[in-house]
């Protein structure tokens, strides 16, 4: 029922395969979290500036992506993404066949989902910073970039860190869904291994433990970061 | 106008829409069974979690930790593929239910929502102030009455918005059950895509239905908030 000997490293077991799959999960999570944060900053910017059109687009994006199952978003980007990329390439005069690899597609899809959650966190963090600080910075003669990087940025980061930690956990768990694109991360490796060895329970429990390890470990990491960033407040 | 209607009726998006709509009842069936059971169990688990008896609170804390730390997909696969590979379960009466992808989905969704839900309710129960409990005790309430008349109403009212969030996450989570061959909306959209090679139309049709379902869910939670928070209603003059 539970075959421990199938989990050894080397040719006899799946240990090293699972190690690489875990590294792939971590890679995809970090890449899509980063891209997601970038998209989230754009979204927050679009929501906060006084322009009705950008706000409408940003609100539409967050409402739709958060109201639709993650799996559907991934399917749409995975199966529909190539068509979109090829039609964009056609505009630039390239008529060949383009196929994006699973890593790129998966990262983009998860980033689109992660960005909707991050944008809520960042928006709340931005609004939590006292507006008097911007005025104080202006009174000191700081320019826009200095205000953002020296005054607002660090404080937004402090307010956003707990929420960002939550989004990271969600993103990490969402990467299990891109196994449907064929990218060999933990979940895909689990399916492959259990089909070969006819022992799904062994590998599924392994996968669950790996995810548990990743979420717990990164949760601890974010706790330390939070403590570090709120040093001046305790 | 008639021309336009004809065109619309024959368009791929509209036909896909009708086809995906036929999977709506399967999606709803998953929710109708797992959400109420999940709600009731969450309440009990939350009570166990805040209980002073460690033999109750410790295992529940462990259960919540494990379920919240692993993806739902792993849980669904564990129940659908994992449990089925255990000889003992295949020979027991449980197999009648667990060989069906539907009941595996219901079980996985319930286990998942109970973990998140009980954590939400725990926050609500702990937010009931000591004075409120003491005033209940001074009126001679026993434990059950105290729970029924004071702790639950106050706690539930407080956590309605976050529990509403969890309900929406559950609506979205039902799409994962399609990966165990259960034919609900996402599964049908996937089938349409394999048949027509037009992914965008198929998934947009399903997406619109999910959005609508979530919209209804939000309205339902808003109605509950309105109903149970009469003191917060804006007076209309």
Image: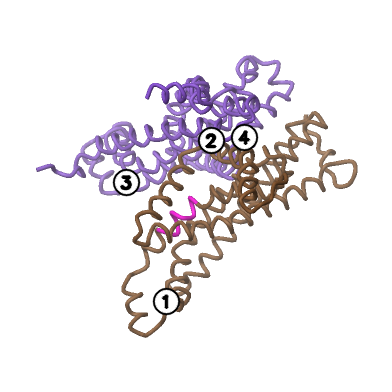
Q: Quadrant of the N terminus of chain B?
A: top left
Q: Colour of chain A?
A: brown
Callout 2–callout 1 Cβ contact below 8 Å:
no
Q: Nearer the viewer, mark 2 or mark 1?
A: 1
Gap in angstroms between the C-alphas marked 4 and 1: 49 Å
State the quadrant of the C terminus of chain B.
top left
Q: How many marks?
A: 4
Residue B48 can be seen, yes or no = no
Q: Which residue is mark 4?
A: B75
Q: Which residue is mark 3?
A: B128
Instruction: Kindly check if marks 4 and 1 are in contact, taking CB atoms under 8 A apart as contact.
Output: no
| Label 4 environment density (alpha carbons within 10 Å; few <14, some 14–19, many ≥20) | many
In the picture provided, is B228 more to the left or to the right than B196?
left
Q: Which residues are magenta?
A: A116-123
> Tell me, what hue is chain B?
purple
**Mark before the other along the chain sequence, 2 or 3:** 2
> Disc 1 is attached to a residue of which chain?
A
- Mark 4 touches mark 2? (CB < 8 Å): yes
Q: Share a chain, discs 2 and 1?
A: no
SS for dot 1 = helix
Give the residue number, with chain letter if any, for mark 1.
Answer: A144
Closer-to-camera residue (A231/A26): A26
Between the C-alphas of marks 2 and 1, the distance is 46 Å
Residue most toward the bottom? A140
Instruction: Give residue B203's position: percent from left, percent from top.
Output: 55, 33
């Amino acid at each position: 029922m539970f075959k421990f000997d199938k989990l050894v490293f080397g040719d006899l077991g799946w240990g090293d395969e699972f190690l690489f799959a875990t590294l792939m999960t971590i890679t995809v999570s970090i890449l899509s979290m980063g891209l997601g944060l970038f998209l989230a900053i754009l979204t927050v910017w679009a929501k906060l500036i006084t322009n009705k059109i950008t706000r409408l687009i940003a609100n539409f994006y967050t409402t739709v992506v958060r109201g639709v199952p993650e799996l559907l978003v991934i399917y749409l980007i995975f199966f529909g993404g190539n068509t979109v990329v090829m039609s964009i390439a056609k505009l630039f005069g390239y008529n060949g066949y383009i196929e994006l690899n699973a890593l790129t597609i998966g990262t983009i899809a998860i980033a689109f989902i992660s960005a909707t959650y991050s944008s809520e966190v960042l928006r709340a963090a931005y609004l939590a910073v006292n507006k008097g600080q911007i005025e104080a910075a202006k009174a000191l003669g700081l320019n826009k970039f200095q205000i953002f990087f020296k005054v607002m940025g660090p404080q937004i980061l402090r307010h956003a860190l707990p929420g960002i930690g939550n989004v990271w956990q969600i993103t990490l768990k969402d990467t299990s869904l891109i196994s449907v694109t064929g990218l060999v991360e933990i979940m895909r490796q689990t399916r492959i291994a259990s089909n070969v060895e006819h022992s799904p329970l062994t590998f599924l429990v392994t996968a669950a433990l790996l995810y548990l390890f990743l979420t717990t470990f990164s949760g601890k990491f974010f706790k330390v970061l939070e403590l570090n960033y709120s040093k001046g407040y305790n | 106008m008639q021309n336009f209607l004809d065109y619309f009726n024959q368009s791929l998006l509209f036909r896909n829409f009708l086809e995906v709509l036929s999977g709506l009842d399967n999606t709803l069936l998953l929710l109708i069974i797992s959400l109420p059971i999940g709600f009731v169990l969450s309440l009990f688990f939350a009570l166990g979690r805040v209980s002073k008896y460690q033999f109750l609170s410790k295992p529940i804390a462990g259960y919540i930790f494990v379920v919240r730390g692993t993806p739902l997909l792993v849980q669904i696969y564990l129940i659908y593929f994992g449990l089925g590979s255990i000889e003992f379960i295949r020979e027991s009466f449980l197999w009648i239910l667990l060989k069906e992808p539907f009941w595996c989905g219901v079980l996985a969704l319930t286990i998942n929502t109970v973990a998140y839900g009980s954590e939400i309710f725990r926050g609500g129960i702990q937010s009931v102030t000591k004075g409120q409990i003491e005033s209940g005790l001074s009126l001679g309430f026993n434990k059950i009455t105290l729970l029924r008349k004071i702790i639950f109403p106050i706690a539930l009212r407080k956590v309605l918005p976050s529990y509403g969030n969890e309900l929406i996450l559950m609506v979205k989570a039902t799409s994962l059950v399609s990966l165990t061959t259960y034919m609900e909306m996402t599964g049908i959209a996937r089938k349409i895509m394999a048949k027509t090679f037009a992914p965008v139309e198929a998934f947009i049709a399903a997406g619109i239905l999910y959005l609508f379902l979530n919209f209804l869910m939000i309205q339902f939670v808003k109605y509950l908030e309105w109903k149970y928070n009469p003191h917060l209603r804006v007076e209309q003059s």
